[in-house]
Amino acid sequence: MPAKDFLDIDAISAIRLKRLQDQGLRRTLSPTERMADGRVIRAGKPMISFSDNDYLGLSVHPRVIAASIEATSLYGVGSGAARLVTGDNPLNERLEARLAALKGMPAARVFGSGYLANAGAIPALVGAGDLIVMDELCHASMHAGARLSGARIQTYAHNNVASAAEHLRQRDATSHALLLTETVFSMDGDLAPLDELAAVAQDTGAWMLTDDAHGLGIVTHKNPAPLQLGTLSKSAGAYGGYIAGPANFIELLTSRARTFVYATGLPPGVLAAALASLDVMEAEPALGEKALANARLFGSLIGETNIESAIVPVRYGEADVAMKASATLARQGFLVTAIRPPTVPAGTARLRFTFSARHSEGDVRRLAGLVLETLAEAGIAK
Ligand SMILES: *Cc1c(COP(=O)(O)O)cnc(C)c1O
């Protein structure tokens, strides 16, 4: 029998928390209200958020809110059980048809979240004896899906097509290989070289799956990947995940993706909100253009010219320096969260600024001025 202290969950957790605290890795929550009128209130103080992924402002769009309320009034709040158990609310099928059309794919399947889509779809594609080759900066949910699959995993240096090709050429011809990348990298905002990666996948006989969590409605280049996954929780302003692809594969997920089979379907109000968001997104492409224009304006003001998405990271190096800059901006009414290891590699702690169609040019200019001050204070040349 181990010693009594060793069995005390609370005492062991306290030791682990202390260790995280000492390493600057302890995470804490800040009560914050994102209001439907677009204001963000923290500790009684109104702030402008440059931290959320609601790039088009659709989470607070009147038409999206109305659609959500209407579906909730009609169907109630929860969906009751997994879609295979209670029967499939027709909003699911409508949303899936919409997503398939949007992605130019034969079919799509909606999941409870983007995380669940990756955790379910990847193990339905490959398994033990197969090979996964993935960008080192792929999201935690892609890593989770890859590990759950039991396939052998090789990561390649960020966006290094030659390295991806080298790993894929090592594949065993009698098993499957899967290439994984994000389209827009969530912490850096840069784009994957999708055409080059697709060519490598084609040459080596690998399948390719992309995660477009941060691209939807913003980056509209054609994506050559035959399997395209994404989320409804970011620019669609709602919640949920999806994957679009060949019809039989999508049908296979209905039986084989464990995060689909064994998890409750999305609430009707969320499905209706996502559908309304896709309508607004299609009717108003200017929203995505405005978000991108705001990111580019900020970039030009702080001396970053290569802005390809609505995400602009500014690196401060050590976690405490980024935290201090975040606190300085907060005092001026800007909510920008510091992103620290292990979310990003050690020594690359950063403020991750995300831009929305709802930000005004004046807000962006004032923010850029303050950011330049925090960089100067930290002794970082720009
Ligand atoms: C946010 C994110 C996810 C997870 O999506 P959720 O709907 O929030 O679960 C998956 N992949 C990437 C690249 C993301 O940025």
Image (cartoon, rainbow, N blue to C red):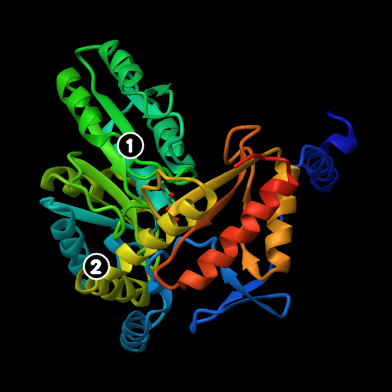
Mark 2 secondary-structure assignment: loop
Residue 153 vs 66, above or below: the answer is: above
- Compute the Cα span from label 1 to label 2: 22 Å
Is residue 26 at all visible to an observer of this figure? Answer: no
x, y (%) of residue 60?
43, 78
x, y (%) of residue 159?
37, 29
- Neighbor class of circle 1 (other Cα within 10 Å; few <14, some 14-19, many 20+) is some
Q: Nearer the viewer, residue 275 or 175?
A: 275
x, y (%) of residue 113?
40, 56
- The image quadrant that residue 266 belongs to is bottom left
Which residue is under mark 2?
285
Q: Which mark is residue 192?
A: 1
The amino acid at mark 2 is Pro
The amino acid at mark 1 is Ala
Residue at figure coordinates x 18%, y 26% from the top left: 199
**Drawn side of residue 158 relative to residue 348, left or right:** left
Upstream in sequence: badge 1 or badge 2: 1
- Neighbor class of circle 2 (other Cα within 10 Å; few <14, some 14-19, many 20+) is few
